Amino acid sequence: MERIELYPIFNRFTVYNDHYDGELEELGDALGRDCMIAAFLPEKFDFAREYKGDGSKNEDWFSWNAEVFAPASGKIISVYINDVTNVPGQMNPSRASSIEIQRDDGVNIVLAHIQNPVVSVGEEVKEGQLLAYVGNNGYARNPHIHIGAWRGDQPLMIGFDAKKVGALREKTDECYWIMGISDAEYEKIAKG
């Protein structure tokens, strides 16, 4: 089973759920990875979580409307929009909004459950370029990005290049990386 290393799609602390071999069969789904932003709540710095409050609104989720960056350089070969936004906990059994990138080496990468894409079919994109924002549509229970990759008819395992994640983390304000707020906002909360 081949594995590819990609550029991180978020500029925040991220948690993943990998689709195991045989769980999903379709190319793009098979061996894919669901990516969600997690954060520590500044007022209760105990453990990272994926949402604040009870998670019943999309806006509660740290991933909701977050920037989604290109995991690789390549050509945009498909952009699909599903205009129905799901309520957290309720799936809509329909195709998710998505962007598909094809690299020069023939690897295709799909990013699903996006919203508000800022790229178009035929456009060449560079690794790390803004593509869209996180949505909650299609077969999804909560805001996240599903990423899948394949070459020909072979699904590929997804990994994010740890050196590139580290370099991105170094460029990003620490409070933003782990809490989604600026250092100044944190200082204000810490002072009470």
Image (cartoon, grey):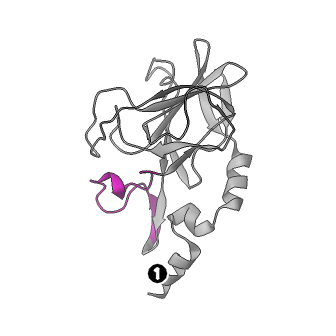
- Which residue is most to the top? 153
Q: Position of residue 73 (x, y in %)?
A: 69, 33
Q: Is residue 118 left or right of residue 144?
A: right
| Residue at the spot of label 1 | 189
Please tell me which residue is depicted at 68% across the width and 25% down the height of the picture: 103
Q: Amino acid at mark 1?
A: Ile
Quick check: 110 above or below 27? below
Quarter of the picture containing the C terminus is bottom left
Local secondary structure at mark 1: helix
Please tell me which residue is depicted at 59% across the width and 53% down the height of the picture: 11
Quick check: 182 above or below 79? below
Q: Main secondary structure of the magenta part?
A: loop
Taking the magenta stretch, the answer to whether it contains residue 182 is no
Give the extent of the magenta segment. 45-65
Dot 1: few (<14), some (14–19), or many (≥20) neighbours within 10 Å?
A: few
Q: Is residue 164 left or right of residue 139?
A: right
Q: Is residue 105 left or right of residue 35?
A: right
Q: Quadrant of residue 170?
A: bottom right
Quarter of the picture containing the N terminus is top right
Q: Nearer the viewer, residue 103 or 143?
A: 103
Please tell me which residue is depicted at 57% across the width and 49% down the height of the picture: 10
Q: Is residue 105 left or right of residue 19?
A: right
